[in-house]
Image (cartoon, rainbow, N blue to C red):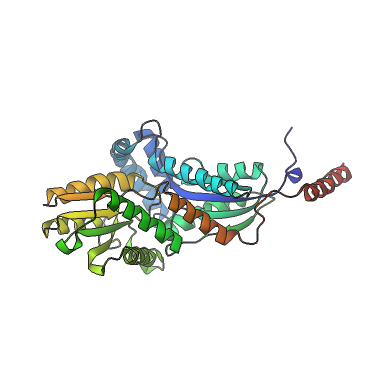
Amino acid sequence: MKQNPHLQASKTAVLLLNLGTPSAPTPKAVRAYLKEFLSDPRVVEIPRIIWWCILNGIILPIRSSASAKKYASIWMPQLGSPLMHYSRLQAKELGERFTNEGHTVLVDLAMRYGQPSTQKALEDLKEQGMERLLLLPLYPQYSATTTASSFDEVFRVLGTWRDQPELRLIKHYHDNPAYIAALRDQVLSSWDKDGYPDFASGDRFVMSFHGLPKRNLMKGDPYHCECLKTGRLLGESLGLEPGQYLVTFQSRFGKAEWLKPYTAPTIEKLAKEACQRIDIFCPGFPADCLETLEEIAMEAREIFLEHGGKDYRYIPCLNSNPKWIEALRGIAYEHLLGWPLGVESAEVLAKRNERAELAERTKA
């Protein structure tokens, strides 16, 4: 018999939100993922009828197999999707931080597209007694295409519930000091291990963020500005001069103008200008994924070396860096202020149970 939810101790929950990944590096799985992703009107702002024809008639038949090969090149043995692996690890380690500090805070992960779905994650939290919910997107820089879309899906699911939880949202943390410190630690750890660039000799540090159509910026999306601020703060924290680091944008799709400068042409230009070494990092991606491991660590490397570059170094994303987990904890705590972070006392729970049982008897 299913337990009456009113007889459970109410709990606070943190739900990490990420974009998603195919369930397998196969054309069938990739096609299903791309269809869900590219059908989101927040992602592609083209009239629905026109876009439906383009998506189903051209893009999915052509891109599914090609993308599946790319996913296969970065799929982790025994672990599967890097994005899924590291996102789950971040949720697990954040939950352990709360537990180690004596708090009873539920922590889970939801993907906007694919599994674990937002609906499944919310229902699981509800079953565990969630009464208060903090949404923490794994998108440090806000965009309607990512953050807002994930919020939309949460709202859609909660819109079907009779008994909704208290709700708080974290919009962005692109300039949060702990986030910047975690980025700095990730870069310095790489340089301590592999050697520091020689900026006086023309080496460059490139920060590549996911791109968006320029029209998104013109319509008021703050993403571009937030990426530039993250880049500036990270560059300053590393003690670099403006000319020693660059902010670029990757993953351009289609013929429309996107945010500039584009990553691949910039890397090619640096190589042709006799830049011998590039260190490249993706601050907007908390977890490694197709866009970082295949597009940046592999494709961009080939471009740099083919055009005269000598030393190309990809710096992994934050992944499970302890300073990043600590930053997540701090960001969450800032927005959890005023909410109970433990289980209700036995006395409070007993009184609530008595009221619920009385209501049940009255109803009968």
Q: Is residue 328 visible?
A: yes
Residue at image position (40%, 68%) is 219
Q: Where does the C terminus fall, quadrant-wise? A: top right
Q: Which residue is outermost to the top?
A: 78
Q: Is residue 258 left or right of residue 114?
A: left
Q: Is 60 or 233 nearer to us in this picture?
A: 233
Residue at image position (14%, 55%) is 276
Q: Quadrant of residue 4?
A: top right
Q: Is residue 253 visible?
A: no
Q: Where does the N terminus fall, quadrant-wise? A: top right
Q: Position of residue 53 (x, y in %)?
A: 36, 47
Q: How many marks?
A: 0
Q: Position of residue 265 (x, y in %)?
A: 19, 57
Q: Is residue 93 left or right of residue 361?
A: left
Q: Is residue 228 above or below residue 54?
A: below
Q: Quadrant of residue 280?
A: bottom left
Q: Is 94 or 352 nearer to us in this picture?
A: 94
Q: Is residue 164 left or right of residue 243?
A: right
Q: Is residue 302 above or below residue 76?
A: below
Q: Is 160 or 54 nearer to us in this picture?
A: 160
Q: Position of residue 81 (x, y in %)?
A: 39, 38
Q: Is 254 or 140 nearer to us in this picture?
A: 140
Residue at image position (37%, 55%) is 185
Q: Position of residue 8 (x, y in %)?
A: 73, 44
